[in-house]
Image (spheres, helix red, strand yellow):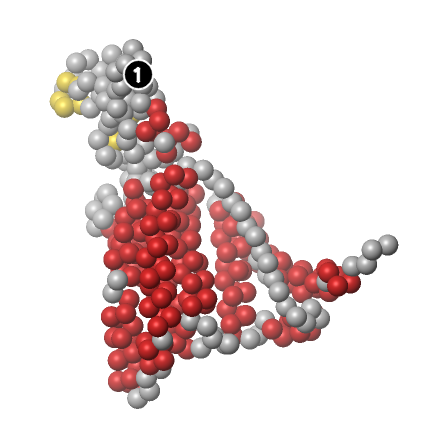
């Protein structure tokens, strides 16, 4: 069939089998996308910087949730060594999952990606754009038009789920190594604590939930940031002193990294000489809160 015969619908195309030999109109194969001429072409473009930010952001969400579950389940008055190890294991799991996801995505065995960049919001929802020329027969052209930005996140969550099942095993391995070289079993209490297992069970619910959210809302860019702080003593000196406590200090540093990530995502570092110094602005919200918290105490508000 001649490729000059166009296809109806946004995502229906013809697959080329040989010289001037094309299939009927339908969905493109995985790793292909229809071009402006109605022909399925292979996704060979390199990801933009924003695409990498999108991928790492989706991975970072799982890390943040798992850290939160760890803090809620394995309660410590201070940041202890065993909890820090558990946080590190969570981060390690997700980094390994992300690297494996890159390696198993074309080109296989490489940390590079071949992509079809999204052009419109509907690219994420091709299921809803199958044409019906006679209002009776539907031509099914559902495909991954944003390959591999859609499927790769599911691969990442699947690998994270698999590694999660072995977390207890390598926590015991880490405990054995520490005991072998230091003579102290730093992780004994953590391994015996049933709340450690509880974090694993809760994450088993979180990952399918995130997968569902990604499946439905992957194309929507919605950013909602809610920050709540509670400190009994709002004096600047006390707030400043609390920054140097292990647990609070780690949380604040994580917040700074999130702020830096936001600056990088907005600027994409297109002009490094101008945009890199902006990263120094990350601590400003913390400084502003310390300096102005005393003026926002609800107990000091009086009705006139």
Q: Which residue extends farthest right?
A: 304
With 99 as the anchor, is 69 left or right in this view? right
Residue assigned mark 1: 132
Q: Residue at x 71, y 71 (%)?
A: 235
Q: Position of residue 81 (x, y in %)?
A: 41, 77
Quarter of the figure that contains the N terminus: top left
Q: Return the residue nearer the eye: 45 or 235.
A: 235
With 214 as the anchor, is 225 left or right in this view? right
Q: Residue at x 13, y 22 (%)?
A: 18
Vertical placement of residue 82 versus 167, above or below = below
Q: Quadrant of residue 181?
A: bottom left
Q: Position of residue 159 (x, y in %)?
A: 26, 54
Q: Quadrant of residue 162?
A: bottom left
With 92 as the anchor, is 42 left or right in this view? left
Q: Return the residue nearer the eye: 2 or 83.
A: 83
Quarter of the figure that contains the C terminus: bottom right
SS at badge 1: loop
Q: Return the residue nearer the eye: 115 or 170.
A: 170
């Amino acid at each position: 069939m001649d490729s000059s015969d166009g296809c109806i619908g946004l995502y229906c195309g013809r697959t080329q089998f040989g010289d001037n030999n094309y299939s009927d109109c339908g969905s493109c194969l995985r790793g292909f996308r229809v071009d402006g001429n109605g022909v399925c072409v292979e996704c060979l473009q390199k990801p933009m910087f924003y695409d990498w930010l999108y991928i790492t952001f989706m991975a970072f969400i799982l890390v943040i949730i798992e850290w939160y579950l760890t803090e809620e389940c394995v309660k410590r008055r201070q940041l202890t060594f065993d909890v820090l190890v558990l946080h590190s294991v969570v981060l390690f799991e997700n980094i390994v999952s992300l690297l494996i996801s890159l390696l198993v995505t074309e080109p296989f065995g490489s940390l590079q990606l071949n992509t079809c960049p999204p052009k419109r919001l509907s690219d994420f929802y091709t299921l809803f754009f199958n044409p019906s020329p006679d209002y009776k027969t539907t031509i099914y052209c559902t495909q991954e038009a944003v390959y591999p930005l859609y499927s790769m996140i599911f691969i990442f969550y699947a690998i994270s789920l698999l590694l999660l099942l072995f977390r207890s095993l390598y926590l015991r391995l880490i405990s054995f190594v520490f005991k072998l070289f230091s003579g102290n079993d730093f992780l004994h209490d953590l391994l015996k604590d049933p709340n450690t297992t509880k974090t694993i069970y809760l994450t088993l619910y979180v990952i399918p939930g995130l997968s569902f959210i990604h499946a439905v809302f992957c194309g929507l860019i919605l950013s909602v940031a809610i920050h709540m702080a509670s400190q009994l003593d709002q004096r600047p000196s006390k707030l400043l002193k609390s920054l140097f406590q292990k647990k609070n200090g780690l949380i604040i540093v994580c917040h700074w990294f999130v702020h830096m990530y936001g600056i990088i995502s907005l600027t994409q570092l297109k002009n490094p000489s101008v945009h890199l110094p902006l990263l120094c602005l990350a601590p400003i919200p913390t400084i502003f809160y310390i300096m102005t918290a005393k003026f926002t105490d609800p107990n000091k508000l009086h009705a006139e």
